[in-house]
Image: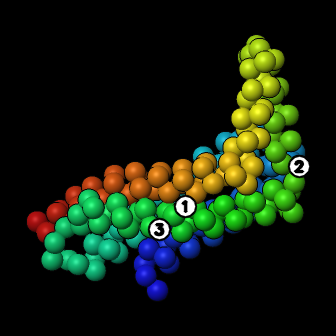
């Protein structure tokens, strides 16, 4: 199995387990405010796995430092695999496991927007946008494309880190 596939599968599965854990803790239903912030920590799963993947890629060819093109391609491929897994999970989650999660989240968000004195017209626009981006078609853009691009960008930065550590090791 190609390392990109393996680490992409691990990242996708890790993110799905994270979201399932949030659900079991009530962060998508009764503790939505905490759930809003817990998602930020889930970023550590794909970042850590991307770093390990790039380190492994470098170790596979110790004669030369990992190039930016190779690091980018590796990160994009693994991130795309993870994104597809997360997309399938989120569509199933929204349809079968917790179909009301979006309403709970929007109730909390609307209360926050009203507390900040945002106009009702803007609130309605935000609700429409949020529902569209969390529909199956919208998730293609926000999850599949977005997560893939974020993984590619992060892999560029992580490639610099792996290169730097490789040079330090060589010295």
The image quarter in which residue 18 lies? bottom right
Q: Which residue is mark 2?
A: 100
Residues at discs 1 and 2 in contact (Cβ within 8 Å): no
Q: Is residue 146 above or below residue 89?
A: above
Q: Which residue is mark 3?
A: 78
The residue shown at (68%, 48%) is: 138
Query: Which image quarter: residue 90?
Result: bottom right
Where in the figure is residue 121, as x and y percent of width and height? Answer: 78, 18
Counting residues from the N terminus, which is met first, the one under dot 1 or under dot 3?
1
User: Picture quarter containing residue 35?
Assistant: top right
Badge 2 crowding class, 10 Å Cα cut-off, few under 14, some 14 to 19, many 20 or more, is some
Q: In the image shown, does 167 or 148 lie closer to the viewer? A: 148
Q: Are marks 1 and 3 in contact (CB under 8 Å)?
A: no
Tell me the SS state at disc 3: helix
Residue placed farthest to the front in the image?
Answer: 137
Q: Secondary structure at mark 2?
A: loop
Q: Is residue 120 shown above or below 85?
A: above
Q: Residue at x 54, y 68 (%)?
A: 81
Of badges 1 and 2, the one in the foreground is 2
Q: Please tell me whether mark 1 sits on a helix, a strand or a loop.
A: helix
In this picture, residue 84 sits left or right of residue 78: right
Q: Percent from the top left, x then y, of residue 85?
A: 63, 67
Task: Using the image, tell me which numbered label, if any, was put on residue 45.
Answer: 1
Query: Along the line of sight, which residue is nearer the eye, 57 or 89?
Result: 89
* Distance CA(mark 2)–CA(mark 3): 31 Å
Q: Mark 1 to mark 3: distance in Å?
A: 13 Å
- Earlier along the polypeptide chain: callout 1 or callout 2? 1
Q: Earlier in the sequence, mark 2 or mark 3?
A: 3
- Bin the neighbour count of mark 1 within 10 Å (Cα to Cα): few under 14, some 14-19, many 20 and up: some
Task: Tell me where residue 117 appears, x and y as whole percent.
Answer: 76, 13
């Amino acid at each position: 199995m190609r390392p990109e596939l393996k680490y992409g599968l691990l990242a996708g599965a890790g993110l799905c387990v994270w979201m399932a854990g949030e659900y079991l803790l009530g962060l998508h239903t009764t503790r939505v405010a905490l759930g809003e912030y817990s998602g930020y920590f889930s970023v550590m799963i794909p970042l850590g796995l991307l770093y390990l993947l790039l380190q492994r890629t470098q170790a596979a060819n110790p004669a030369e430092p990992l190039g930016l093109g190779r690091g980018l391609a590796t990160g994009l491929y693994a991130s795309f695999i993870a994104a597809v897994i997360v997309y399938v999970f989120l569509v199933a989650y929204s349809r079968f496991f917790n179909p009301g999660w979006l309403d709970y989240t929007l109730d909390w968000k609307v209360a926050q927007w009203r507390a900040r004195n945002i106009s009702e017209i803007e609130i309605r626009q935000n609700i429409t946008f949020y529902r569209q981006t969390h529909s199956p078609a919208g998730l293609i853009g926000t999850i599949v494309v977005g997560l893939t691009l974020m993984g590619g960008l992060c892999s560029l930065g992580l490639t610099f880190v792996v290169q730097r550590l490789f040079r330090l090791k060589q010295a």
